[in-house]
Amino acid sequence: MMHASHSPHLPEDWRENAYDLARGLAAYSGSRLVAGIGRVIAKHPEAKIANAFNHKQVGCKMWARDTLFATIGASCRRVVVLGGWYGILPAMMLEDPRFDIEIAVSCDIDPAVEPVAQTLNAAFGDRFVAMTADMHALDYRALNADLLINTSCEHITDLRSWLDLLPPGTRVLLQSNDYFSEPTHISCVNSLEEFQAQARLAHVQFAGTLPMKKYRRFMLIGAV
Ligand SMILES: C[S@@+](CC[C@H](N)C(=O)[O-])C[C@H]1O[C@@H](n2cnc3c(N)ncnc32)[C@H](O)[C@@H]1O
């Protein structure tokens, strides 16, 4: 573990260093997402971007993106991510050349994350939209998405009640976990089987578990 408590000016130093590093990594890798992380560090110092983009979060989202491609291929053009936080998964999908995404929407109930998600995804122009809304209050028919993603199922009170709002046949990718000790995780499950029972999807194309150090993440891909 790294310790840097010797520096009296750590927060400012950290931000400048992180900004320089993100810009360097973006130049080296050519990643528009990483360039977006740099812009977020500069423009939204209050955003917890290091938490949202830590290796565990990135690992779970790469698992989602890669399994999605292996399961349904490139056949999703209009994607809506619910509980989308800073819009990292849409950015990962928008910059992945295997997909052909026309529009990716990131919806979150927290108004503070919308401008951050917009900054992160600025390079994707009008292919990305951030919106502030409760996922329970959306008109899913009007959204006309061909894929709904919710990797925040552990954050919503009653997963099945939310799924009941979607038009039958809607294709979904869902993630939850057994990380009960985090206070904002109000709906964790103990196993993949419990997650499947909670979701009661009409069709399941993929069901799997990703073991992490402190918890397990569960994922379902299918249709309601
Ligand atoms: C901590 S984040 C994301 C955690 C998740 N493991 C991930 O990275 O996908 C959970 C997000 O869900 C959002 N959220 C919770 N309830 C919501 C609701 N009813 N509608 C929309 N967003 C919601 C929160 O505001 C928060 O930004």
Image (cartoon, rainbow, N blue to C red):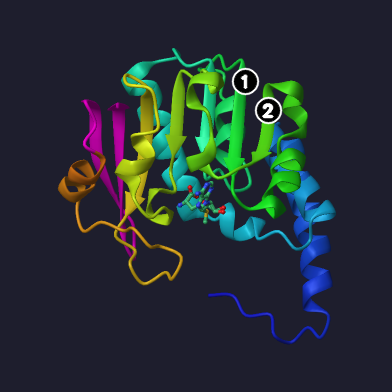
Q: Residue 50 versus residue 82: which sits nearer the camera?
A: 82
What residue range appears in magenta?
Answer: 200-224
Asked where in the image residue 32 lies, by quadrant, the reply is top right
Say whether residue 217 is magenta: yes
Residue 158 percent location from the top left of the image: 34, 50
Residue 31 seen in render: no
- Residue behind label 1 places its C-beta within 8 angstroms of ligand 1: no
Q: Amino acid at mark 2?
A: Phe
Q: Quadrant of residue 73?
A: top left
Residue 128 numbered mark, or none: 2
Q: Label 1: few (<14), some or many (≥20) within 10 Å?
A: some
Tags 1 and 2 in contact by the CB under 8 Å rule?
Answer: yes
Q: Which mark is residue 218?
A: none
116 to 212, vertically: above or below: above
Q: From this viewpoint, is residue 45 visible?
A: yes
In the image, what residue type sits under mark 1?
Answer: Ile
Classify mark 2: helix, strand or loop.
Answer: strand
| Residue where numbered disc 1 is placed | 103
Question: Please, what secondary structure does the residue beneath circle 1 have?
Answer: strand
